[in-house]
Amino acid sequence: MSLPRVVYRTHAILRMFLRGVSEDDVRHVLEPVEVIEDYPDDTLYPRRLILGWRAARPLHVVAAFNKDENETIVITV
């Protein structure tokens, strides 16, 4: 199953740049998802704190999931 469209918030792009994290790294973390914590009642869309690994490097991603638009919104990395 492929990921929905991925949208990056400005904050996420800045953090990715500062931490040397690529879009491929983020997509790797988002498929499959290892959820550390759920925030189902957040305003607008439910969010999740996700843990993934790229080689030996742990990556945490906070993402919201907009089912109506079939998109994942990356908030921070």
Image (spheres, rainbow, N blue to C red):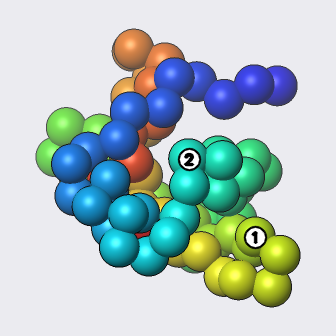
SS at badge 1: strand
Q: Is residue 73 above or below residue 37?
A: above
At numbered mark 2, what does the secondary structure look like: helix, strand or loop? Answer: helix
The quarter holding residue 26 reads bottom right
Nearest the eye: 63 or 58: 58
Report x, y in % for residue 62.
41, 62
Q: Is residue 25 above or below residue 34?
A: above
| Quadrant, the N terminus | top right
Q: Are marks 1 and 2 in contact (CB under 8 Å)?
A: no
Sort mark 1 into few (<14), some (14-19) or many (20+) by Cα contacts within 10 Å: few
Q: Which residue is mark 1?
A: 54
Give coordinates of residue 15: x percent, y percent: 33, 68
Report whether 75 appears left or right of 54: left
Q: Is residue 38 left or right of residue 40?
A: right
Q: Disc 2 designates what residue?
A: 23
Residue at the outermost left position: 43
- Residue 53 point in image, percent of width and height: 74, 73
What is the three-letter code of the residue carrying label 2? Glu
Disc 1 or 2, which lies upstream in sequence?
2
User: Distance between the Cα atoms at labels 1 and 2?
Assistant: 12 Å
Q: Residue at x 69, y 69 (%)?
A: 52
Q: Amino acid at mark 1?
A: Arg
Q: Quadrant of residue 12?
A: bottom left
